[in-house]
């Protein structure tokens, strides 16, 4: 019997060692792996929660834009009512992101290049040698046109200034971010500021028009009218001013009109721009004002 004892004990030892090895290799790592997976699932849930919060914040900050169509003075008028969370949504852009004469592109193309939600043509600074040009706080031209300019400050507020009474440099030093020079001002302090005899250069009394206005803090309007067609006669400056006042605007400024007048929303031109013999076609312009 003694001679088998050693063999039996050795066999038991091997069996015990094998079981321990199996437990160490297979059971313990499974428990650890399960803990890692659970921890990872918790992290994923936390991540999803954070992403939801971020998405909620982004959604709440998105501009509220309402496009309405009106019929006044035998003319179709398009109004974009815009409420933004802060003034950084209100932007400008040059054609091909380049300042200079004869650098032009269609409003819809410039809007597309800048992922604009909503855009209108700007002041077409490139068609003139005078008039302040300030974009994003940078002074490109500091030569007075002798007329009125629209100043947009960093807080999003508007001011109408006479370019002969100041300089672009002074305006920027006072916080101006954008200065547009076309005019005239249509509404100031909630009151119409043009008369029946006011007009832009040698333009006809009734035209396609583009205007930008402010109703309240971070509450803007873009206004574009059709014109020069059998369906729409167009508006005089006084008619445009009176219409914008009826919308509750405190300050409204006239931008380049005629064939330039264009409104683009989500990549689509929603008015009927006229150019080249009153054909329904976009004119190329120097710049845009947009929400994006």
Image: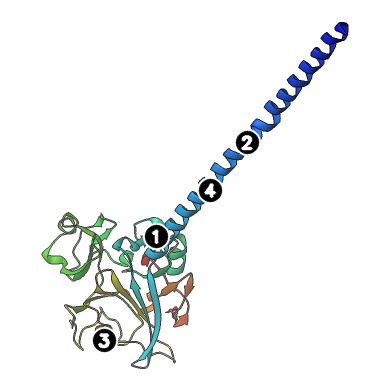
Q: Earlier in the sequence, mark 3 or mark 2?
A: 2
Q: Residue at x 30, y 63 (%)?
A: 86
Q: Quadrant of residue 270?
A: bottom left
Q: Which mark is residue 31?
A: 2
Whole-number angstrom distance, CA of label 3 to CA of label 2 = 72 Å
Q: Nearer the viewer, residue 42 or 107?
A: 42
Whole-number angstrom distance, CA of label 4 to CA of label 2 = 20 Å
Q: Earlier in the sequence, mark 4 or mark 2?
A: 2
Q: Nearer the viewer, residue 73 or 247?
A: 247
Q: Earlier in the sequence, mark 1 or mark 3?
A: 1
Q: Nearer the viewer, mark 1 or mark 3?
A: 1
Q: Which mark is residue 246?
A: 3
Q: Secondary structure at mark 1?
A: helix
Which quarter shows the C terminus?
bottom left
- Tell me where residue 216 appears, x and y as whole percent: 24, 73
Q: How many marks?
A: 4
Q: Residue at x 25, y 68 (%)?
A: 181
Residue 289 to residue 281: above or below:
above
Q: Nearer the viewer, mark 3 or mark 2?
A: 2
The answer to whether residue 253 shows anywhere in this view is yes
Q: Earlier in the sequence, mark 2 or mark 1?
A: 2
- Tell me where residue 103 appears, x and y as whole percent: 39, 61
- Tell me where residue 274 appears, x and y as whole percent: 43, 80
The residue tagged 1 is 57
Q: Residues within 10 Å of mark 3 (few under 14, many from 20)?
A: few
Q: Residues within 10 Å of mark 2 (few under 14, many from 20)?
A: few
The residue tagged 4 is 44
Q: Nearer the viewer, mark 3 or mark 4?
A: 4
Q: Quadrant of residue 77?
A: bottom left
154 with respect to 229 (left or right): left
Q: Secondary structure at mark 2?
A: helix
């Amino acid at each position: 019997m003694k001679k088998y004892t050693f063999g039996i004990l050795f066999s038991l030892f091997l069996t015990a060692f094998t079981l321990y090895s199996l437990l160490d290799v297979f059971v313990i790592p499974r428990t650890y792996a399960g803990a890692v997976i659970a921890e990872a699932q918790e992290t994923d849930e936390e991540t999803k929660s954070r992403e939801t919060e971020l998405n909620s914040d982004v959604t709440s900050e998105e501009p509220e834009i309402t496009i309405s169509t009106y019929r006044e003075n035998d003319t179709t008028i398009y109004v974009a009512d815009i409420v933004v969370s802060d003034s950084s949504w209100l932007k400008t852009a040059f054609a091909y992101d380049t300042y200079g004469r004869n650098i032009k592109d269609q409003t819809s193309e410039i809007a597309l290049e800048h992922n604009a939600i909503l855009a209108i043509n700007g002041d077409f600074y490139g068609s003139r040698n005078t008039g302040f040009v300030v974009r994003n706080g940078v002074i490109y031209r500091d030569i007075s046109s002798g007329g009125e300019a629209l100043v947009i400050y960093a807080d999003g507020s508007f001011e109408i200034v006479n370019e002969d009474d100041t300089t672009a440099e002074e305006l920027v030093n006072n916080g101006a971010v954008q200065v547009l020079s076309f005019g005239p001002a249509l509404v100031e302090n909630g009151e119409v500021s043009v008369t029946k005899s006011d007009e832009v250069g040698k333009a006809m009394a009734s035209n396609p028009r583009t205007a930008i206005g402010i109703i309240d803090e971070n509450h803007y309007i873009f206004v574009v009218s059709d014109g020069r067609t059998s369906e729409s006669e167009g508006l005089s400056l006084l008619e445009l001013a009176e219409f914008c006042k009826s919308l509750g605007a405190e300050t409204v400024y006239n931008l380049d009109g005629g064939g330039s007048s264009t409104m683009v929303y989500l990549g689509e031109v929603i008015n009927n721009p006229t150019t080249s013999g009153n054909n329904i076609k976009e004119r190329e312009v120097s710049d845009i004002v947009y929400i994006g």
